Amino acid sequence: MNDDQAATLRKLKRRGGELWRAYALKEALRAIFAGDLSEQDVSVLLDRFCSKASRSGPEAFVTVAKTVRKRKESILAAVRLKINNGQHEGFHRRAGLIVNRACGFHSANAALGLIVLTLGPITHVLPHERVPELDP
């Protein structure tokens, strides 16, 4: 954060209000998924987040809280197994941009060739294929 951004953030914090609550909730959710917490810690923090988000006011956070409550077991399983779909989502987004660029090509094979050429060889390691990490 540069100096101007830090000053703006301090002003928002002093004023409080809905924008500051939304920022604080967003940062709390980011911290939960930073990857350095145990499954039990994530569970407790998710419960706290859902409680605060449900009472916060902004409709988007109320919706997120409902979704997190509904999917909590799946979220905890992903934390326990250290699995996320970020790599796949990123690939899908880049492939979608390439397909948009390929409008007007004469065949789908040409678009597929452009995807393979641009994104290179695609290698994904499935969770059951990973080498287990050794605890120090």
Image (cartoon, rainbow, N blue to C red):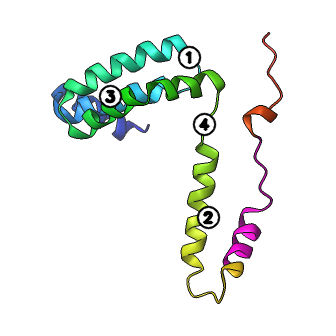
Amino acid of disc 1: Leu
Amino acid of disc 3: Leu
* Mark-to-mark CA distance, 3 and 2: 32 Å
Which residue shows up at 79% across the image and 21% down it?
133
Circle 3 SS class: helix
In percent of width and height, residue 91 lies at 63, 55
Amino acid of disc 2: Ala
Which residue shows up at 73% across the image and 34% down it?
127
* Mark-to-mark CA distance, 3 and 1: 18 Å
Residue 25: assigned label: 3
Q: Earlier in the sequence, mark 4 or mark 2?
A: 4
Residue 117: assigned label: none
Circle 4 SS class: loop
Cβ–Cβ below 8 Å for labels 3 and 1?
A: no
Residue 37: assigned label: 1
Q: What is the span of residues highlighted in magenta in the rendered image? A: 111-125
Name the residue tied to disc 4.
Answer: 84
Q: Quadrant of residue 50?
A: top left
Is 48 situated left or right of 72 in this image?
A: left
Q: Earlier in the sequence, mark 1 or mark 4?
A: 1
Cβ–Cβ below 8 Å for labels 4 and 2?
A: no
Name the residue tied to disc 2.
Answer: 95
Decide: few, some or many residues near mark 4? Use Cα within 10 Å; few <14, some 14-19, many ≥20. Answer: few
Q: Earlier in the sequence, mark 1 or mark 2?
A: 1
